[in-house]
Amino acid sequence: MIPMLDTKSDLKLYEEEIVKEVLEVIRGGEYIFGPKSKQLEKEISEYLGVKYALGLANGTDALILALKALGIKEGDEVITTPFTFFATAESIAHVGAKPVFVDIEEETFNMDPEEISKKVTNKTKAIIVVHLFGLSAKMDEIMKIAKENDLYVIEDACQALGTVYKGKKAGSIGDIGCFSFYPTKNLGACGDAGMLTTNSEEIKDKVIQLRNHGSEERYVHSSIGVNSRLDEIQAAILLVKLKHFEDMLDKRNFIAKTYYKGLNNNFHLTEHVQSREHTYHQYSFRVEKREEFMDYLKGKGISTMIYYPIPLHLQTAFNYLNHQKGDFPIAEKISDEIISLPIYPTLPFELQQSIIQSVNGFLTK
């Protein structure tokens, strides 16, 4: 089977350098928030153009600590999208707040700014914007709504490191940016790791305290925090891969453009909006008769994946919100039709041509 991704081949490109750096950490004896973690924080902050980047255990923690640092609590409401990975809304529930969903745009799969204003109440405290699959949401419109209603904006950029919106990188536009370095991400560790970014010194200080059991000074705890510390070995691996990150994004972009040029447009393909750069964490499009399509490609030895088959408002875990089918029709339609093809920097050109030929062949079989 042609896999959806190939973390082994990606890692092999820098294996010698990674092994050297990991051995240095092991022999050095500092395994949590050592010099590699501090260097990664510095380099990510410089890369994104933000004042502060704070290493965390994973991207989900970044979302939860973002909400905690902003004082979001029980009784508050946070607006977000129903078409994303579960962690986005899960983090809102974790701090006791209510996830308030708005429908998405049919072409970009991102939350529709026109729907946000309709859901703002006196309980609304923040918006969590998801830059889905590596494509930025419409941040100008969203930031304008937030300013008019005195709301915080958290960017869930867990799939969008390197994505650019009108000259600014995702995660540098709102009050807080949240990133995941899960192994399958465009910049992936060999385990879990995450990052939170901000230009606010107050937020930075709060997150530093929260990530270490609410403590700024050893054994002195001024708040209830969590244990969310960046692993030094993961930081070392990420530093190596960060050196090559822009080159990897260029390769993803080339693969995505090759798909767009080669695939039949009956698959509801959409080229990314020119004012926003796409980093193609996934290459996704819509197809009718999806199960038949997936079975056909499986028979050709091609992997596919559905991101995401059930929108969040229809997940059992959120039954308490009393949503029903039809509440967010575009998100539901996309969930029924969306499909993703293999995309990773080391995908050979010849294999991609075989995928394109097989995909197009589905329409003529």
Image: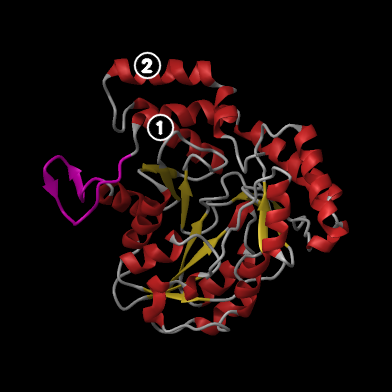
Query: In the rendered view, would you say 162 is above or below 30?
Result: below
Query: In the rendered view, would you say 52 is above or below 156?
Result: above
Q: Position of residue 235 (x, y in %)?
A: 41, 31
Disc 2 secondary structure class: helix
Q: Position of residue 78 (x, y in %)?
A: 43, 72
Disc 1 secondary structure class: helix
The color scheme shown is: secondary structure
Query: In the rendered view, would you say 236 is above or below 2?
Result: above
Q: Amino acid at mark 2?
A: Glu
**Residue at horizontal 68%, vertical 66%?**
337
Pointer 1: what residue? 234
Local crowd at mark 1 within 10 Å, few (<14), some, or many (≥20)? many
- Look at the image and give the residue range highlighted in magenta: 212-229
Pointer 2: what residue? 24
**Residue at horizontal 24%, vertical 45%?**
212
Which comes sooner in the sequence, label 2 or label 1? 2
